[in-house]
Image (spheres, helix red, strand yellow):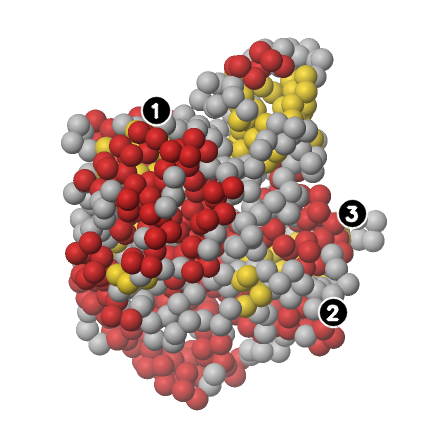
Amino acid sequence: MADAEQWHKTACILCSINCGLEVQTGGEDGRRIVKIRGDAEHPASRGYVCEKSQRMDYYQNGADRLRSPMRRRADGSYEAISWEVAIREIAAKFGAIKTQYGKEAVLFYGGGGQGNHVGGMYADSFLKALGNPYRSNALAQEKTGEFWVQGKMLGTGVHPDFEHCEVALFVGKNPWQSHGFARARVLLKEIAKDPARCLIVIDPRRSETAEMADIHLAIKPGTDAWCLAALMAVLVQEDLVARDWLAEHTRGYEAVAPYFSGIDIASYAQACGLAEQQIRDTARRIAGARSVAMMEDLGLQMNRHSTLGSYLQRLIWLSTGHYARPGTNNAPVPFLSLAKASKGETSARRGPRVERRSPVANAKIIIGLVPCNVIPEEILSDHPKRYRAMLIHSGNPVHSLADSQRMREALRALELSVVVDVAMTETAREADYVLPAASQFEKAEATFFNLEFPDNVFHLRQPLFEPLPGTLPEAEIYARLVEAMGELGEADYAPLRRALRFGRLAFALRFMIGTLRNPKLVKYAPVILYRTLGERLPQGMASAAALWGAALLYVQASPATARAAGFGGLLPLAADRLFQAIISQPSGVVYARATHAMSWQAVGHPEHRINLKLDELLAELPKLDAMPPPVDADYPFVLSAGERRSETANTAVRDSSWHKRGVYGSLRINPQDARRLGCADGERLLLRTRRGSAEVIAELSDSLQPGHVSLPNGLGLDYRDASGALLRKGVAPNELTDAQARDPFAGTPWHKHVPARLERVAQALSA
């Protein structure tokens, strides 16, 4: 593996951007990451790096890493078992559940988080062996409403061009901390310093990004929809829309406009705590701009009226003509679409997809994902179609989903629960079996969050270390499970292994011809590629074999963008050249080059026209006239659960010992509220919600409005220190949240609008 003195290419795993890194390894056992810097040769991040990447070794060498398969005993403790026993028992028990209850009885949760998606390709093969139709992951508590909207409107995903836009608008997003696009802090500084450009932020909190903004619409918490509807109303009522552009490229505007022509802009401004003139001036600045790029995030997506808000923000930039041009939103070209997210629920070739619902709660299933907030309801029921088993892959729903206690109860009620992960997480401690995976730096790994424009980058990370003894890459785990189910064997591998003796072109032809005769080659392609092509790849790279199939599918689907990136020619040859580039270029490869014209071709509706009229959401708009609900007298504060801060990222890094200075995991509170409570900075408060309570450390901050408090994300993890003692640092937000508080349309949680109350705790921090 990696030599200590040499700099090795890899990537950060703490947010969806996965910036390229260079690292040096060392330590007494040679298994530590000792130095980290940005990779200047990475095509997307270009040397950019933030402070969070410096924590990679705390992930790689966490004290709670697993080293053996674990089986839960009757008393709740765990015993180590062999891989042979684990695979045999798990395959048999999943098979028995399928036989007794049907394929609908298993729920798959996960897919790889922010840094490891390759293993999910192999998990998919095992799910196909089970015939499993129900899946969920963290996207179903964040992005499903947005995906549904963009699918219905555009039929494609979009990427904002903040590098060239005149106006950058962020709704419920603080890219200084959450990023969300490459080189975020560099671009924010460039926009803020340029007097010809304008940075607009819609956020109740004066975040780091809002501090830089030319216009900060500091709305009341939970009133994003009123603000966005008022902005759209100004565009309609003052006729600031791009009428010629709308007539040429869209359909439905004339039906949409009347919904906004009667809105009382002054009352909507009052509802969200803004002056009417602020709303009007902002709308006019957007309408008058040469180019506008817009982006939403969890501040909107985990709030009241989230799906409606996703619709309204798109109406704003589409009605003013800001699509498929430099500095606007354009369509990226995914290497492998996650859950067909780029298509939403529509397809230009196949028409509308049939709407699916979950079996117990009857919740809408969007992009194939069951809403996270209904998972406990789907289990804790006497419904004959309830879930009886869960396979959890690189996910931690007990910690990351609403109402942690309810999620624990649900896992305990299952007949079988299996976790595949690198560490003994909160979820793993509730499971029947825990299978230890190799870390993200011990195998070939990548993510499919490649959503850039015009150049799209895929970065396959080569392993830095050998897998920890006792662990296996997910590819091997799921291959063994599929084989234990009796679905694959040597007879399926032998013809392809023989073809490989004559090179990869012969292999490609044999594989493509074989798919016509043997449906298993398609159904279980990742495992078959791993067991054949993977054996011929460089050391540690076998898990990358499934990407050969992904390259084949990509070049077949997008030959023009592949050709523009240098991968043209006959399909198997072009795909193989792309695959070779992927496995041999350690900083990543530009696999697609798109044009603005291609953004129009990507619009997945008849005549490539954008659909502005979404009847289901337009019907929700008049309900805003009732004004926001009054504050709950018993819980007068609004808690935003899960603020992104410099000291937080995601739960992949469980060890908090890296944090040496300052307050860790504090509750930020406005000084006026603190004075009313008689609370000083650094004192303890008791934070209560309808679902739980926690002691918190007060951090006075005028970045929040009175009545608004905030806790960081990703904390409150149980972690064993060097002595073996179980520690918890910070507050786990989902011990306080309510699974019933969710968007009625997409089922996404209202984590940013949790009713709460605060009480003083006599003991001060210094006691």
- Please report whichever mark, 3 or 1, sits nearer to the chain's N-terminal start: 3
Q: Amino acid at mark 2?
A: Pro
Where, by quadrant of the figure, is residue 755 drawn? top right
Q: Are marks 2 and 1 in contact (CB under 8 Å)?
A: no
Q: Amino acid at mark 1?
A: Glu
Q: Are marks 2 and 3 in contact (CB under 8 Å)?
A: no
- What is the x, y in percent for residue 704? 47, 23
- Residue 313 visible here: no
Helix, strand or loop status at disc 3? loop
Q: Nearer the viewer, residue 413 or 741?
A: 741
Position of 385 with respect to 17 (left or right) is: right
Residue 77 is marked as: 3
- Please report whichever mark, 2 or 3, sits nearer to the chain's N-terminal start: 3
Q: Could you tell me how many numbered marks the image carries?
A: 3
Position of 702 with respect to 289 (left or right) is: right
Q: Is residue 266 above or below residue 533?
A: above
Residue displayed at 38% across by 43% down: 263
Helix, strand or loop status at disc 1? helix
- Please report whichever mark, 2 or 1, sits nearer to the chain's N-terminal start: 1
Residues at marks 2 and 1, CA–CA distance in whole angstroms: 53 Å
Residue 203 is marked as: none
Residue displayed at 40% across by 59% down: 614
Q: Is residue 49 above or below residue 528?
A: above
Tell me the mark number nearer the camera, choosing from 2 and 3. Answer: 2
Which residue is denoted by mark 1 in the rendering? 211
Residue 384 is marked as: 2
- What is the x, y in percent for residue 571? 26, 75
- Residue extending farthest to the right is 75
Where, by quadrant of the figure, is residue 110 drawn? bottom right
Q: Nearer the viewer, residue 684 or 652?
A: 684
- What is the x, y in percent for residue 649? 48, 36
Quarter of the image that includes the C terminus: top right
